[in-house]
Every structure is written in structure tokens, then in C-alpha cells.
Image: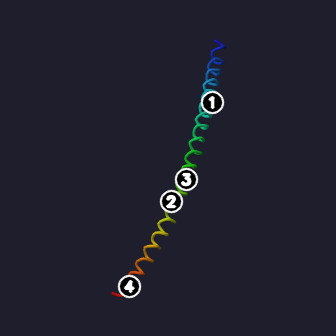
Amino acid sequence: MTGEPFALIEKRINDLVGLVASLKEEKAALSVQLDQKSAETKELARKVAELTQERNEIKARVEKILSRLENIEL
């Protein structure tokens, strides 16, 4: 009878140790995912900046062409 409370405490401690180990693994996996998503976000931001610059260059070229067309006398 006196061993029962200790067995219950030991079981709970073992369960908690298992839970902590599981949470550590989950945290590590989430950290890896976060790093991957951060890298993806950085790459997408770079692409957006590149496309924005390209769009601005094309817009400037089109405006220049339109301006030249407007100056042509028929």
C-alpha cells in the first residue's frame, strides 16, 4: 500500500518527462519551419522589389515613347 502513491508519482513524472521531450522536438521542428518561412519571405520580398523596379523601368520607357509620339507633327 505504501508503494502505490510513489508509483503514481513516478508515473506522473515519467509522463511529464515524456511530454517535455515531445515539446522540445516540436519546438525544434517549428523553429526549422520558421527559418524556412523566413527565407521564403525574404526571397519573395526580393522578387517583389525586382518586379517593381522592372515595372517602373517599363513605365518610364512607355511614357518616353508616348511623349515622342505626341511630339510628332502630322
User: For residue 27, which quarter of the picture?
Assistant: top right
The residue at which mark 1 appears reads as: 21
State the CA–CA distance, disc 3 to disc 1: 33 Å
Residue 56 location, x and y as percent? Answer: 48, 69
Q: Which dot, 3 or 4, sits closer to the camera?
A: 4
The residue at which mark 3 appears reads as: 43
State the CA–CA distance, disc 1 to disc 2: 41 Å
State the CA–CA distance, disc 2 to disc 3: 9 Å
Q: Residue at x 66, y 14 (%)?
A: 3
Question: What residue type is disc 1 on?
Answer: Ala
> Which sits in the foreground, 56 or 33?
56
Q: Which mark sits nearer the N-terminus, 1 or 2?
A: 1
Residue 70 location, x and y as percent? Answer: 38, 83
Q: Residue at x 42, y 81 (%)?
A: 68
> Which sits in the foreground, 72 or 39?
72
Question: What residue type is disc 4 on?
Answer: Ile
The residue at which mark 2 appears reads as: 48
Task: Determine whether, in the image, residue 4 is placed left or right of residue 40.
Answer: right
Residue 72 marker: 4
Mark 3 burial class by Cα count in 10 Å: few <14, some 14-19, many 20+: few
The residue most toward the top is 1
State the CA–CA distance, disc 2 to disc 4: 36 Å
Residue 69 location, x and y as percent? Answer: 38, 81
Question: What residue type is disc 3 on?
Answer: Glu
Q: Which dot, 1 or 2, sits closer to the camera?
A: 2
The residue most toward the front is 74
Mark 1 burial class by Cα count in 10 Å: few <14, some 14-19, many 20+: few
Q: Which dot, 1 or 4, sits closer to the camera?
A: 4
